[in-house]
Image: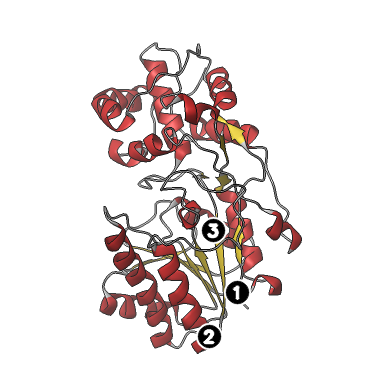
């Protein structure tokens, strides 16, 4: 029997993983500081930055066999990122140890920063066997902590590296789906054509994304596949895209005219439309969500100004048994339609 604890259950990754395990009939607890609306699993309100609070709060998850670690806190410097995110993982592991949990497997999420995607150009397609960079990185620190704990306490660990995770979740700064959805909806409300807001270099560069539901299925696979023990896997939809091709498709979906790219800093431009969005919420009876929690504009600026290919190889995961894939353009349109159906954004028609 499995009992799964998902740390960071309020995020786009954590929520989809928790829901996937529930769908498969596995007992799930979701851990986050704030409650998660509509959760179909038991919620534990725990602050993992507080070691004592983590130890106390995790006592309720003493039967945990699988830890899925999706908790993350953004910090302005590399050193602060390492300190805070290492503490989150360490406190979660120590809390489970103190509770006497029969832990068998931990899934840890990393990403393109492991290859230097945040620094600029990196060799593509990036492979899991590529050496670490000399630049300090909290992914490396967390992986070292996890591998040491696994060796000491006898559980297995798998590291998954998605890129550009897309799926519905609010309050998560790194979700390009919500950036596109809210930006397009506001542009449409203003009567403007849809424009790619980044650079021409990013417009033409190869990129990839990871659907949150696909990543959830990969997580379930990693937690039960013997070949995944101790391994690192790149997990994406399996194809590559150019924004040059996707943005006209977005315009067609929203029934908008399309215009040539115009670089705009979304973090500067979009906050002024908070009042307009609130009016749209009332007019279309949308889910009421604080505007600051809807989309991570700074993250959008980073993605839409990354003028280099960002491609990782998913061959290793396929060779080891996870061959799930999606057409990214089709999936974006499905997700955008789902946001309208769920009244997160206004309907197109």
Seen at 37% across and 59% down, the residue is 72
Which residue is identified by label 1?
230
Q: Which residue is mark 2?
A: 151
**At x 45% / y 30%, what residue is drawn?**
181
Q: Dot 3: within a 10 Å radius of its alpha carbon, few (fewer than 14), some, or many (20 or more) residues? A: many
Position in image of residue 275 (x %, y %): 24, 25
Q: Who comes first in sequence, dot 3 or dot 2?
A: 3
**SS class, disc 3:** helix
- Of the numbered discs 1 and 3, the one sitting upstream in the chain is 3
Quadrant in which the N terminus is drawn: bottom right
Sequence order check, earlier mark of 1 and 2:
2
Front residue of 299 and 290 = 299
Give the Cα separation between the discs numbered 1 and 3: 20 Å
Label 3 – label 2 distance at C-alpha: 25 Å
Q: Nearer the viewer, mark 3 or mark 2?
A: 2
Do the residues under discs 3 and 2 have CB atoms within 8 angstroms? no
User: What is the quadrant of residue 346 in the picture?
Assistant: top left
Helix, strand or loop at label 2? It is helix
Q: Which residue is nearer to you in this view: 262 or 337?
A: 262
Which residue carries the number 3 mark?
17
Quick one: SS at disc 1? loop
Judge whether 12 appears above or below 265 on screen.
below
């Amino acid at each position: 029997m499995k009992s799964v604890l998902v740390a960071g259950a309020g995020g786009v990754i954590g929520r989809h993983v928790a829901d996937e395990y529930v769908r498969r009939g596995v007992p799930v607890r979701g851990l986050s500081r704030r409650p998660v609306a509509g959760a179909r699993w038991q919620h534990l309100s725990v602050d993992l930055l507080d070691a004592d609070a983590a130890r106390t709060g995790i006592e309720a998850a003493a039967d945990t066999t699988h830890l899925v670690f999706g908790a993350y806190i953004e910090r302005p410097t590399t050193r602060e990122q390492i300190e805070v995110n290492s503490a989150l993982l360490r406190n979660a592991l120590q809390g489970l140890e103190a509770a006497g949990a029969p832990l068998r497997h931990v899934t840890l999420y990393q990403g393109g920063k492991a290859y230097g995607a945040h620094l600029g150009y990196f060799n593509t397609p990036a492979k899991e066997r590529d050496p670490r960079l000399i630049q300090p990185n909290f992914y490396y620190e967390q992986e070292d902590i996890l591998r040491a704990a696994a060796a000491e306490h006898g559980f297995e660990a798998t590291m998954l590296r998605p890129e550009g995770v897309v799926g519905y979740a609010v309050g998560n700064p790194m979700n390009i789906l919500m950036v596109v959805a809210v930006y397009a909806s506001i542009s449409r409300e203003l009567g403007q054509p849809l424009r790619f807001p980044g650079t021409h270099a990013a417009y033409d560069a190869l990129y990839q994304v990871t659907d949150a539901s696909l990543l959830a299925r990969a997580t379930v696979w990693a937690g039960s596949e013997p070949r995944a023990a101790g391994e690192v896997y790149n997990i994406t939809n399996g194809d590559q895209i150019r924004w040059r091709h996707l943005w006209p498709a977005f315009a067609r979906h929203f029934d908008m005219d399309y215009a040539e790219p115009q670089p705009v800093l979304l973090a500067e431009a979009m906050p002024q439309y908070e009042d307009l969005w609130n009016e749209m919420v009332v007019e279309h009876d949308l889910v009421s969500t604080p505007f600051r929690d809807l989309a991570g504009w700074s993250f959008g600026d980073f993605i839409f100004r990354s003028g280099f290919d960002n491609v990782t190889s998913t061959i290793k995961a396929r060779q080891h048994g996870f061959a799930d894939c999606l057409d990214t353009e089709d999936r974006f349109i499905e997700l955008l339609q789902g946001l309208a159906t769920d009244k997160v954004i206004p309907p197109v028609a």
